[in-house]
Image (tube, grey):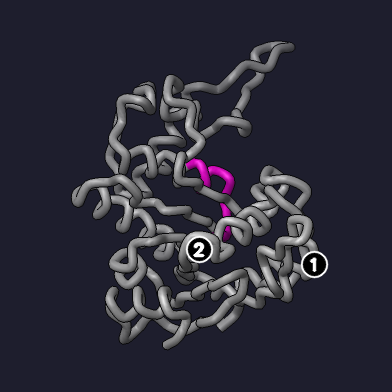
Amino acid sequence: MSAALSLRQIRKSYGAVEALKGIDLDVPQGKVMAICGDNGAGKSTLIRIVSGAQEPSGGELSLDGTKVVFASPHDALVQGIATIYQDLALAPRLSIWENIFMGAELVRRVGPFSVLDKRRMAQDARGYLQRLSVPIDDMERPVERMSGGQRQAVAIARALRWDARVVIMDEPTAALGVKETALVLNLVRKLRDEGRTVILISHNMADVVALADRVAILKSGMKVIERDVAGLDADALAHMVMTGRE
């Protein structure tokens, strides 16, 4: 199975503190890869490196077999990696289409001038949400008037707008109810159905078992387990996270 993203000996130190101690990881193309671990295991540091928010102290990353270096999160986004953090980084008072096209606005020519093509952006935003099976017609609705699951859909639609090949989702169902959690799980499945690669960071072992094809477990800055999720239940996975052993 080909790897969409490969990490080789990724290390990160903060002074004398070694947060990551040589992580090797291959994220399979078109699959959901879960990364689990207790607080302080190194998950957040690893994601900051993959998303371009931090540089590693050592090691290298490859995207579709090509070595990459990210100068910033926007650089990673342009090269095909979108990160959806737990706070979603949405502008609550702006409309749906404004959030989806933030930083990538479409323009049209009116004589010698360039103006925002609001109609096309609203139309395209509706199309992205329809691809995710989220039927919302009013693209002028402020994001602050949407449910938690719908906001996740807007954040994912923004990743589709950038045509991200790898989508990192950090605790996507945190603080959501049962109905909203089911919506978000379906959104992740839609991404996989489109052939996109998803990296899922989650403390919810039921979500991991329901969604992920493979799981990597970190402990004290090291990868201690990597395996297929098939055959695991939530309790078994939670035990592996706690003990670092299969």
**Quadrant of residue 192 within the rendered picture:** bottom left
Measuring from the top left, give residue 29's x and y in whole percent.
Answer: 55, 72
Disc 1 is placed on an element classified as strand
Compared to residue 157, the image places residue 42 above or below, namely: below
- Density class for disc 2 (Cα within 10 Å; few <14, some 14-19, many ≥20) is many
Q: Amino acid at mark 2?
A: Ile
Task: Give me the residue at 55% from left, 83% from top.
Answer: 1
- Mark before the other along the chain sequence, 1 or 2: 1
Measuring from the top left, give residue 22's x and y in whole percent.
Answer: 71, 75
Residue 163 part of the magenta-drawn span: yes
Disc 2 is placed on an element classified as strand
Asked whether residue 80 is in view, the answer is: no
Residue 204 part of the magenta-drawn span: no
- Density class for disc 1 (Cα within 10 Å; few <14, some 14-19, many ≥20) is some
The tag on residue 80 is: none
Asked whether residue 116 is in view, the answer is: yes
Task: Give me the residue at 32% from left, 39% from top.
Answer: 148
**Quadrant of residue 230 within the rendered picture:** bottom left
Q: Nearer the viewer, residue 60 or 189?
A: 60
Give the side of residue 216 with respect to residue 104, left or right: left
Q: Amino acid at mark 1?
A: Gly
Q: Nearer the viewer, residue 58 or 32?
A: 58
Q: Name the residue beneath numbered marker 2.
A: 199
Task: Give me the residue at 28% from left, 46% from top.
Answer: 176
Q: Which residues are magenta?
A: 158-166
Q: Nearer the viewer, residue 99 or 71?
A: 71
Q: Name the residue beneath numbered marker 1.
A: 58
Q: Nearer the viewer, residue 105 or 223?
A: 223
The C terminus - image quarter: bottom left
